[in-house]
Image (cartoon, grey):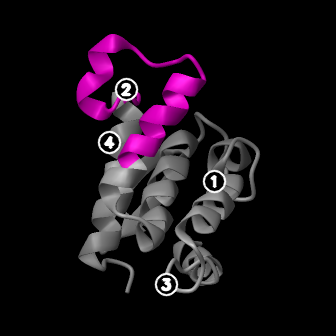
Amino acid sequence: MMEANLRKAAILNPKINPWLETAIQFALRVRPNGEWDYKVAIGWNKTRTVIVSGKKYYIDGEDIGNIHYGYVGRYLFDGTTLLKAGGVVQRLQGRSKPEWFATYYDDPKDYAAVSRGINWYNSGIFK
């Protein structure tokens, strides 16, 4: 799934397309009910067993969606941009809390999952 969507994301490469168009196309795919909204497709609270580099993880659909956002998004954008954008979405949806300042007002659980996806991309774990 991750590598297949990286190939799809390749057509959005910011070296080829303007940054704003890339951001819009990415946002359309990861938005609620978008093509890459795995939170809905898998189910928010349904847990899946995922093996990455021989290590077993039990990850729910919400976290899989956020990890995917971080992993595939990191191909296109820097990690800080992705983390800040997550906070912007929380704010726009009226779901942020003042005490979430350190996570750019994103839910700390979501922030951790997005960070995991970014870190997995940066480590080259799937390459």
104 or 65, which lies in front? 104
- Identify the amino acid type marked 3: Lys
Q: Residue at x 30, y 75 (%)?
A: 53
Q: Which residues are magenta?
A: 83-107
- Identify the amino acid type marked 4: Ala
Q: Residue at x 63, y 44 (%)?
A: 39
Q: Residue at x 60, y 68 (%)?
A: 22
Residue beneath disc 2: 105
- Identify the amino acid type marked 1: Ala
Q: CA distance from mark 3 to mark 2?
A: 30 Å
Q: Which mark is residue 52?
A: none
Q: Please report contact status of discs 3 and 2: CB closer than 8 Å, yes or no.
A: no
Q: Which mark is residue 15?
A: 3
Determine whether the residue tagged by mark 3 lies in a helix, strand or loop: loop
Residue 5 is at least partly visible in this image: yes
Q: Residues within 10 Å of mark 4 (few under 14, many from 20)?
A: some
Residue beneath disc 1: 27
Determine whether the residue tagged by mark 4 lies in a helix, strand or loop: helix
